[in-house]
Image (cartoon, grey):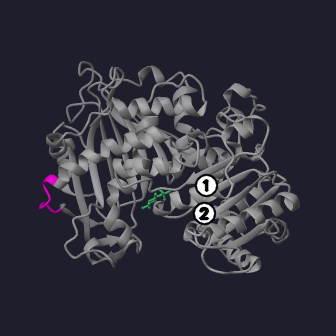
Amino acid sequence: MGARAATRPPGVDVGDEDRNGDASAMTNPLRNGLIEDRTGDACAVVIFGASGDLTRRKLMPALYNLAVSRSLPSGFAVVGVARREKTHDQFRAEMKEGVGTFSRRKPVDAALWADFERGISYVAGTFSSQKTYEDLRAHLEALDAERGTRGNRLYYLAVPPSEFSAILSGLKSAGLVQPPSAAREGGPWTRAVVEKPFGHDLASARALNDGVAASFDESQVFRIDHYLGKETVQNLLVFRFANSLFEPLWNREHVDHVQITVAEDIGIEGRGKFYEATGVTRDIVQNHLMQLLCLTAMEPPISLHADAVRDEKVKVLRSMRAMERSLVQENVVRGQYGRGSTRGDEAIAYREEPDVAKDSRVETYVAMRTFVDNWRWSGVPFYVRAGKRLARRVTEIAVQFKKVPPTLFRAPDGGITPNVLAMRIQPDEGIALRFTTKEPGQHTVLRDVAMDFRYGSAFGSNTPEAYERLLLDSMRGDATLFTRRDEVEEQWSFIDRVFDAWRAEANAPPPVYSSGSWGPDQADDLLARDGRRWRKP
Ligand code: BG6
């Protein structure tokens, strides 16, 4: 279609009633326009786990990019907290290297960095020692005076979940946590951002949630699912509810089925220990993929307020047909990658990866046939799949519409290709609509063609990364793009049943698929039984 982005109208202030329970939260970004127009509240961002990969690769580059787009508040500081002793300057140098390597804006602007790094500092300490939090308190109070951070704190837990509760209770005992009422009365706010994996199953997720709730109110907790920060994922609600064309068709009357694919061509990238304890179902399906399903299937929320959106997602999760043991056998296919090739290189099998058991039964691929048993979607299958070492890296949601009656045209394979709307989340972000046309010529020959919208050509390619958006939203107190406690627990309760069934058949190793293929043949059979096929995205 080659459309160009229209000039954006000025932002609309949605008023105080649309804020997420604390008076410092700003207007809702979905209504208010692009990221560059918005700045966070004055605050100190405190990163626990500051020497880890996430800080170097994602968090600091994202904060730097926010500095470039002038989205950071004038009163701003970043404090890294980790075990190792190091000086502020050492920490700044490490962060500069990380930003230089991983930022989407390169090279690093020297003058801007010099200004930005004045706000970066470091506190060494173990998370189990109360002294760490006492040191941190003194440091933060000094920053309030020097940098105008106004007592507002965003604690970012870039650490394994086993550390969450010690850190949060350490902060609380040191008087570093304000109740939400403080912010409502115009005082400082406190928020905690927590990273996935948020639990291993329902019981552990509940225990983690309880641990967090002992020190923080739910309105102060921001659980990251970085897929929600992707532009194309945010666009799902805009596409569905800001266009009158598709929504009337978005239901069981018109939709034949939905396919959601989260395919990666990489393997486990040296994370053998993590993967052996996790598998793709916990790593991708429980969170990213189920979020995509929710945004595709949910009803229009009553507003764009964080809780209104999350209420609708929770309803979808509650409507998902529970995977009883017998249903898992029929509807779920596992796989594990064997040798093969990716991007032209030979690839080793999962069981040959470092830190992976030679007889591992962990799945690196899963496909499911699921149903959302509510009024809108009754009887419409949602086929979902996720896997490592597949043929290509692609995440997409494809809505296939019903066939027309076979009365007018004769097509060679006995049917006209149904319309498909494919929303490409990444890469080559865009939306494609496939429909049937007459091929030019003397005869009526039908041909399947596509109408393509590409983000790159419409908006340019330098879009903000997920972490930029999520960090800024957490500084602003907007929890729309973060998962709520009940949402995470509903996701686990669906996934737990799948694992129950797999445990019951403990001796069956997952079928092996070749690296670089589209997964095990059994996944094709899952759709073939319904007379359907996976798309080759
Ligand atoms: C993470 C998973 O949550 O998402 C990784 O732990 C996966 O295994 C990654 O590779 C995929 O994210 P993205 O943004 O590259 O699609």
Q: Position of residue 145 (x, y in %)?
A: 87, 59
Single out the residue that lies furthest toward the right: 146
Q: Is residue 522 left or right of residue 95?
A: left
Instruction: Answer few, some or many: residues within 10 Å of disc 2's Cα (few below 14, many 20 plus, some between 14 and 19).
Output: some
Could you tell me the amino acid type at mark 2?
Lys
Q: Which residue is mark 1?
A: 467
Residue 6's place in the image compared with 66, above or below, is: above
Which residue does the image show at 18% across and 49% down from the upper left?
501
Instruction: Answer few, some or many: residues within 10 Å of disc 1's Cα (few below 14, many 20 plus, some between 14 and 19).
Output: many
| Element on which disc 1 rests | helix
Give me the disc on residue 376.
none
| Element on which disc 2 rests | helix
Q: Is residue 250 left or right of residue 363?
A: right
Q: Which residue is mark 2?
A: 58
Which residue does the image show at 66% across and 81% down from the upper left?
85
Residue 506 belongs to the span the image colors magenta:
yes
Real-space Cα separation, disc 2 to disc 1, in angstroms: 7 Å
Could you tell me the amino acid type at mark 1?
Tyr
Q: Main secondary structure of the magenta part?
A: loop
Say whether residue 437 is visible. no
Q: Tell me the quarter of the picture where residue 445 sits.
A: top left
Q: Are marks 2 and 1 in contact (CB under 8 Å)?
A: yes
Question: Bounds of the magenta span?
Answer: 504-509
